[in-house]
Image (cartoon, rainbow, N blue to C red):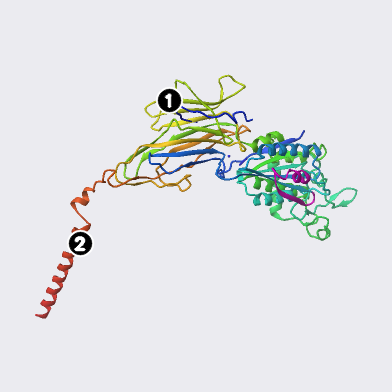
Amino acid sequence: MKNATRVFGAALTLAVAFCALGGVNSYATTVDTDDKVWFGDKTASELKPDGASDIKLTLPAGEEEFETDIVFVLDKSTSATVEDDALKMLSDLKDEITNQEMTKVKVGVVIFNKVANPEGYFDLATEYGKIEASIKREIKSGTNIHAGLLAAKNLLADGGAANGRKYMILVSDGITYMYNENPTATYYRFSADSISDWVGPDNYKSAYGSNDAPSDWNAFFAKAKTAIDNKNFCEYPYGKQDACRESDKKDQKDIDTVTHALYKTYALYEEICAEINCYAMVNGGNTYYVWGPDFIRFLAGDKQIDFSTIEKEILYLVDKGTLTDKMGMGKTEDGQDYKFEMDTDSFELYVGGEKQEGKVVEEDNTDLTIVFCPTDAVQDAYKYILRYYKKGGLSTGDENYFDLIINEAIKISAPLMIKYRAVLETKPELVGTYGEYDEDGSEGFNGLYTNNDATLDYTSTDGTEGSYTFQKPTVQYVVEAGKGEEPETPADEVENPRTGDNFAASAAIMVISAIAFAGSAIYTKKN
């Protein structure tokens, strides 16, 4: 896949509900993606008469339907065991998301032989039977991984999920010798009992002398790219090599059809997986065409996992983390101070829409600590711990802030949500309008910020670490005439007035002087 803190008040009561949430070689490639709006959101209400804004933070983002797209790219010879393991993963996911209105998982299936045979998308919650039938289709003749990936790329482009929520799972033995949507081969003559030009996986051995995998796949593909760029070869639709038999390139030895197919597959896989989450799984353990399974392992960086691991990476947003939320503070454009504080009696925590019970505990190093959901495994341990630090208390900086320690994996089917009130305690005093309202921070207005920063530092289920910074909502505060001090008139305007009656009088004098001067000039001319 392409690359805390909580505050709160003494009297908190919540109801415990979701506190307890609960044979193939496979290799994963994960990439970071900038496309993470789906990851989480934070919103703020307009200021109420008491100067408070209702804050809501959700992981994953909860305002719209949370969509996930999964596309299987399966070799025609995929074993029944692999199919069953894939279906069990999907069945488990289906059980998690059924009856979750805001969580949608769609599944597409591409089975490839000489060509790609795509089906889908299917809704996992309601069309599991169709998915099962699609995965278990029997198709024969030929192996064209490149065509399968082309079809998968189109399916993924048509899906509605964000790139970070798109998953492609390739299952193959890697033994490919055709490429393109319409099966194409590279003409390559070799000696058997006589000069031959038939197409198949044995072309690799004819070119390299054995079926061993390259010692360096990167060097192998660099050489292949050079040969392809030089174009000293003849291509033909699979099964129709007659035209190439008469070509002046019929005896070329720059590149064989297996190498050409492997390169195009590799290049397309890299292109797709630069944007989405990808997994490559070795189907079976072919010991004759050793280069095939080794190629699949190379695609995914030799990181071995299984379907249960893939399921976790799809199902869980993060494994654990710390959310740090710093209350908004700063200066208005005219230099007045503003500052928000947490209403410590307002904090609420929800998992899967169910409010959780919090308990205030004493800790020496915080101004307030609230714990949620004790764990069964460790005594006096909790799944969520809120720690609040207040300026003038134990905060090390100028802000009031809180940390929420998350010790429980967050499921896409059971979002984590917190709610609290941010109160504008230090307000501008001069008559005027300050800030612009932006519910979710998407407009990028320059204040008034309800928080200066909210960042989740997390560990994924695969052990990789990352961070996500939420956008900053802004609110507007108005000091009406008669309810605040009038702004002082700048000194230069007092000494040199430029507006109103004084400016009009000055202008009139200038006009009269000009007329008098013009009249004098005319009279002089007459004399």
Image coordinates of residue 438 in percent, x first then y, are: 45, 46
Image coordinates of residue 141 in percent, x first then y, are: 83, 49
Residue situated furthest right in the rendering = 193
Q: Identify the mark nearer the N-term, 1 or 2.
A: 1
**Which residue matches tag 2?**
504
Q: Amino acid at mark 2?
A: Ala
Q: Helix or strand or loop: what does disc 1 sit on?
A: loop
Q: Which mark is residue 367?
A: 1
Residue at image position (62%, 28%) is: 20
Left or right: residue 429 compared with residue 32 = left
Q: How many marks?
A: 2
- Comparing 237 with 511, the one in front is 511
Specify start and end residues of the magenta stretch as a single range: 113-134
Q: Is residue 55 visible?
A: yes
* Quadrant assignment for the C terminus: bottom left
- Magenta stretch holds residue 465: no
Residue 350 versus residue 158 in the image, above or below: above
Residue 327 versus residue 479 in the image, above or below: above
* Quadrant assignment for the N terminus: top right
Q: Which mark is residue 108?
A: none
Residue 474 versus residue 497 in the image, above or below: above
Q: Helix or strand or loop: what does disc 2 sit on?
A: helix
Q: Quadrant of residue 305?
A: top right
